[in-house]
Amino acid sequence: MSQIMTEAIHAYHSVTATDTFRNLEWMRQKTAHDEAQALANARRQERELWQGVAEERDTAVAERDTALAEIEKLRQQLARLTN
């Protein structure tokens, strides 16, 4: 191994062995983790919101269909009464 490579490796090891470097690396990893968690939480909240919207829509459609069926029954009863 060349002298320059050996010196570079030693310099790298001496820098990464410092408390400052370890603290900075820990903060970088924590920040990346926190960002990933925030994104996952936002996606989960968005899914829950859209599920709620879909459920409300489905309920409204079911209520409309029930009302339309009831109206049709009343029309048929009225038609029988008027004949």
Image (cartoon, rainbow, N blue to C red):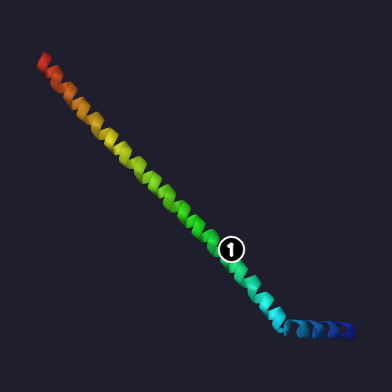
Q: Secondary structure at mark 1?
A: helix
Q: Is residue 47 above or below residue 12?
A: above
In the shown orientation, is residue 65 left or right of residue 52? left
Could you say where residue 48 lies in the image, as x and y percent from the top left? 42, 53
In the shown orientation, is residue 10 left or right of residue 44? right
**Image quarter of the N terminus:** bottom right
| Depth check, front residue: 56 or 77 | 56
Q: Residue at x 25, y 29 (%)?
A: 68
Q: Which residue is mark 1?
A: 35
Could you say where residue 37 lies in the image, as x and y percent from the top left? 53, 64
Density class for disc 1 (Cα within 10 Å; few <14, some 14-19, many ≥20) is few
Q: Residue at x 89, y 86 (%)?
A: 3
Could you say where residue 67 lies in the image, as x and y percent from the top left? 24, 31
Quarter of the image where one finds residue 16 = bottom right
| Depth check, front residue: 48 or 8 | 48
Quarter of the image where one finds residue 18 = bottom right
**Image quarter of the C terminus:** top left
- Amino acid at circle 1: Glu
In the current view of this chain or complex, which residue is farthest to the top?
83
Q: Residue at x 29, y 33 (%)?
A: 64
Q: Residue at x 24, y 34 (%)?
A: 66
| Depth check, front residue: 33 or 7 | 33
Q: Is residue 56 above or below residue 72?
A: below
